Image: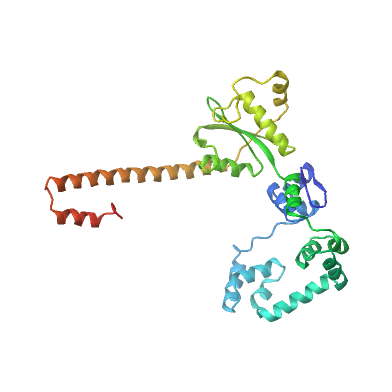
Amino acid sequence: MARDVWGDYVTPDMFEEAERNGICKSTVKSRIGNGLKAREAVSRPLQHKYKKDAQYQQYKRQALEGGISASAFYQRIKRGWDLDAAANTPLLDARESTKRGREARSLLIPKNISSLAMENGICRSTLYYRIIKGMDKTKAATMSPMTTQERSRRWFAQDWRDDTLYKTHYAHGLAYIGRTNQKLSSRLRGHFFKKRMHREIDIDAVTLIEYAELPSVADMYCYEILLINALKPMYNHSDRARDELSNELATLCSRLEFRPWESPLMEKWKTQIAERDRAAEAERKAEIAREIEQREMRRKRRASEITEDEYYDWVESTEVYK
């Protein structure tokens, strides 16, 4: 279950509310990872996509003619500027921009808070980040910064990471059991596209993919080994024993509830993989044809069927030695 940095959980009902607001689950988790509160993560509207709007494009061209870059124009729109002001307000020079930034930060961070942070060994950038994320100013100036080890432990203890087990089935049986704490679609894509550190799985042979979310990394590790030894998938070799599990451990496997994983990405991946395989096959056949032609030209040269000049003219006209 997802939890923000203030300790508030995002319940399944809140995820459903986010979906009704047009916000997907991954966006909610990304927002929480970036420091938003749980309630804000499920309710804040998505950024409007201006770039396909005809009026936006018209004002964008006007901005470019006035020396305002496309990125600066877009950032102004995101900050709430109207199109006319974003396209016609001149850019600040570097000195004026720096001056205004310092004034804004000085208003946000009083001098006594800044001095208190320095006394506690907290740098100004950390103090500024804490305050803009909603932390109380006094707490932001006094709470000790985390060490690298503490940040690492906090990362692995976060509840919003998806600790997932997944099963991949072929028509003739269970093919593979794996674990991941990244997006399941990303992990499966690595299997299908033969990425490094991924077990190769034939996407055309897959008939069913199932997954189960676990409450912790430790549970995910333990259940993976239990399932591998209980179900004996054909591609899991490293953690599989020759004998069978005891009845006590075998009953634990039945506690997991696996759900089918379905996605339109599968058809897209099948098309991409088929195109890649066709290109690789065409390249392989072309390479064979080049080798056959190369052998034939060498044979003709040895048999004096062609002259040396003809042979080297052929070499220069082909990519055999390039």
The quadrant in which the N terminus is found is top right
Task: Tell me if I can see residue 248 in this picture.
Answer: yes
* Residue 60 vs residue 271, the one in the foreground: 271
The quadrant in which the C terminus is found is bottom left
- Measuring from the top left, give residue 98's x and y in whole percent: 71, 77
> How did the renderer colour the structure?
rainbow
Task: Tell me if I can see residue 22 in this picture.
Answer: no
- Measuring from the top left, give residue 43's x and y in whole percent: 77, 53
- Say which quarter of the image contains residue 230: top right
Q: Is residue 215 left or right of residue 283?
A: right
Residue found farthest to the left: 304
Q: Is residue 148 above or below residue 59?
A: above
- Measuring from the top left, give residue 118's x and y in whole percent: 82, 68
Q: Is residue 24 left or right of residue 311?
A: right
Q: Residue at x 72, y 68 (%)?
A: 80
Q: Residue at x 64, y 44 (%)?
A: 183
Q: Residue at x 65, y 28 (%)?
A: 227
Q: Residue at x 71, y 67 (%)?
A: 79
- Say which quarter of the image contains residue 184: top right
Q: Is residue 31 above or below residue 224?
A: below
* Residue 312 vs residue 64, the one in the foreground: 312
Q: Is residue 15 above or below residue 40?
A: above
Q: How many marks?
A: 0
Q: Is residue 311 left or right of residue 23?
A: left
* Residue 67 vs residue 254, the one in the foreground: 254
- Measuring from the top left, give residue 94's x and y in whole percent: 66, 79
Q: Is residue 187 above or below residue 318?
A: above
